[in-house]
Image (cartoon, grey):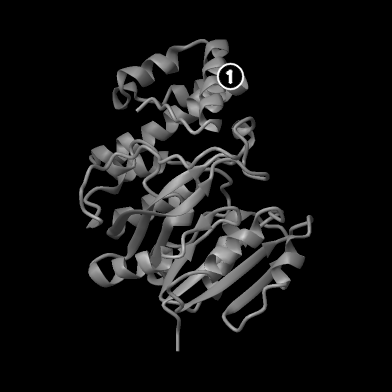
Amino acid sequence: MKPKFSVVVPVYNKANFVKQTIQSVLDQDFTDYELVLVNDGSTDGSLQILKAFDAPNITLLDQENQGLCAARNAGIQAAKGEIIALLDADDLWEPEHLQNLFELSQNFPEASLYGTAYVELFQDAKPVPPKINLRTSEQQLLIEDFFEASLFQPLVPPSSFAFKKEVVESIGGFDTTVTYFEDVDFYIRANLKFRMAYATRATMHYRFESENQVTHSNLHEQRIADLSKYLEEHPDHKSLRNYIHRHWYFLCNHFKTEGAQKQYKLLRSKLDTRSLNPRQRLLLALPTPALRALRRFKSGLLKKGFRVTSF
């Protein structure tokens, strides 16, 4: 009998975190799931940790390093469950997370995408709730416009996101040519075609900063998803346009702080500042030293459990 969920965990050099991550899956209240672990050529002992978890509902795939997208795709391809639940190897689930997702699948049969609220963990600071563009008193709801709801911080990071396996069969998997914004690219394709059900109770803990994440000091060296094609394909989709330009604003600021002037100028020429609020336009105009100082200040506040944003 096929399980309801296939939990896909890609792993690359996360020996300091992955044991706790896997244990958070094994501690789930909802037990109709399989766990697919994909070791993507780790060199730090992660594979040995993964091998220590031995149960009939655990599958371990071991492959040469091919990148996050290829690891996710391998796990999805091997999955037998009806719904794929993603979990990065340094994030954590509360025991009721899969139950949360299961209830969404039962209560909203018209949905093929599912998401839950989350909190951010930064080192030893207290958990910080993100600022998302969604105001509701409901515990569960259908998202009317994913792109509008995602204009601030992400409505769902990958570890609080799940989808029916048929979604991948329809739109394809994660783009293996991309190393940054691969999740944004997938969200766009998925939400243009399918509906999302969402739970406002936070059951995922996102580690805001851990080893081996793509650092914000080298974004100009990454293969960033080309989002322009979606604007060309959907020229009248206002919320999608705003969603993409907000991501370009984010990248422009990072390129500037990195001193990547060529990449900054190229992307800045595409950016429509009408999609930004006055505070964001002000930040975009700041000279590089001031922007770097502001980012250091924000990082210091986050370490103490306080978040300030331009939204």
Residue drawn 56% across the image and 39% down it: 122
- Which percent across, then down, holds residue 62? 70, 69
| Horizontal side of residue 86 vs 194, given as left or right | right
The C terminus appears in which quarter of the rendering? Answer: top left
Q: Quadrant of residue 134?
A: top left
* Residue named by callout 1: 261
Query: Is residue 286 depicted above or below 68 in this figure?
Result: above
The N terminus appears in which quarter of the rendering? Answer: bottom left
- Which percent across, then down, holds residue 195? 27, 59
| Horizontal side of residue 91 vs 232, given as left or right | right
Residue 225 seen in this snapshot? no
Residue 31 seen in this snapshot? yes
Q: Quadrant of residue 310?
A: top left
- Which percent across, then down, holds residue 289? 57, 11
Q: Residue furthest bottom?
A: 1
Query: Is residue 123 depicted above or below 87 in this figure?
Result: above
Residue drawn 47% across the image and 41% down it: 226
Circle 1 crowding by C-alpha within 10 Å: few under 14, some 14–19, many from 20: some
| Count of marks overlaid on the render | 1
Q: Amino acid at mark 1?
A: Gln
| Horizontal side of residue 56 vs 108, given as left or right | right
- Which percent across, then down, holds residue 231? 34, 40
Residue drawn 58% across the image and 50% down it: 177
Q: Quadrant of residue 65?
A: bottom right
